[in-house]
Image (cartoon, grey):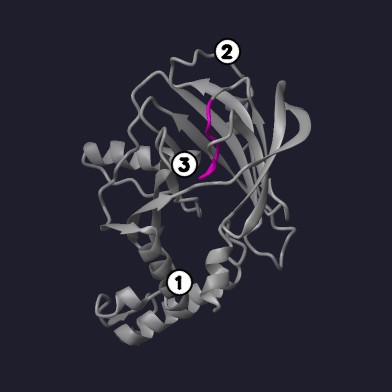
Amino acid sequence: MKIQFLLFLMIINFSYSQDKLFLYDYTFISDSTNKMNVKNEIMILNIQKDRTEFYSYERYSSDSIQLSEAKKGNMAMPKNKVLINERIVKYPNSNQIDFITFISWDKYIVKQDIDLKWKLENRFSKILGYDVQEATTEFGGRKWIAWFAKELPIPDGPYKFKNLPGLILKIEDTTKSHIFELKGIRINDHNFTYPNLNNYKVYKLNFDQYVKKFKDYRKNPTADLIGQIPDQRDAEGNFKTSAQIIKELNDKWLENFKKDNNIIEINLLHQEKR
């Protein structure tokens, strides 16, 4: 991570006519019962002429390597590390976004309307030498505090946040469970296309359909695997039926969900319990 940050320390002058990369440090607490376990990942806000894309730097690098090797006829394995899979595509002068995510081994492109109600506060500060103003909103079951810079007249920001009169340089929820903070700016002088590995099923949903799918998955994560896994022997030679294998996977994933109880849009889990 230190090596990556060295790439981001040089903040350079840029023209608003050029494509830009804004690099954010995202720190988050995924398990509310273990607040000392703070994770972080470098995220990129990629400003293009017709859209902006927000995604994980490490996931993008991994996908790029896999795609490059696949074109050569080689197989490259993804990193043996849990990375942020979500990607957000936002469009100018529109409240509609594309939320691209994965459930199990399937890819979902979710159409969602985001209409944030911002309140501008009479509080000011500086971030990376830019004058910033505070603004607050509510989204995803959380209250958020943002600092935006009018010097950077880009009505965008990390994750699904946008529509302030300047770029959001930092935003955090009031519990400080999720914090995005700008660390650097780079010029992106090429037409950007996110690498498409094309090795998974793709489904297009509206947001209500996605919420139902998400809730069903959290209750029974292996529902879609029934009939997909044959009876087989494990590495020790023990015979296991398809039902046994699926049950073991289901129990494992449900146990993991217990430690993934503090997701960014926490209202999805609140709805899940109703």
Which SS does the magenta portion mostly show?
A: loop
Circle 2 SS class: loop
Mark closest to the chain's N terminus, 2 or 3: 2
Q: CA distance from mark 1 to mark 3?
A: 23 Å
Residue 159 in the magenta stretch? The answer is yes
- Front one among 64 and 149: 149
Q: Nearer the viewer, residue 200 or 53?
A: 53
Q: Position of residue 38 (x, y in %)?
A: 69, 53
Above-or-below relation of 248 to 178? below
Give the residue drawn at x 37%, y 42%.
63
Which residue does the numbered mark 2 point to in the structure image?
13
Mark 3 lies on a secondary structure that is strand
Amino acid carrying mark 1 in the image: Lys
Left or right: where does residue 160 sit relative to residue 145? left
Q: Secondary structure at mark 1?
A: helix
Tell me if 182 is positioned left or right of 237 in this view.
right
Residue hosting label 1:
215
Which residue is disc 3 drawn over? 55
Left or right, 194 with reference to 13:
left
Name the residue rendered at 49%, 50% in the picture. 84
- Other residues around mark 1 within 10 Å, as few (<14) / some (14–19) / many (≥20): some
Residue appearing at x 30%, y 40% in the figure: 67
Rendered image quadrant of residue 255: bottom right
Q: Amino acid at mark 3?
A: Tyr
Q: Position of residue 133 (x, y in %)?
A: 71, 31
Q: Position of residue 23 (x, y in %)?
A: 56, 32
Q: Quadrant of the C terminus?
A: bottom right
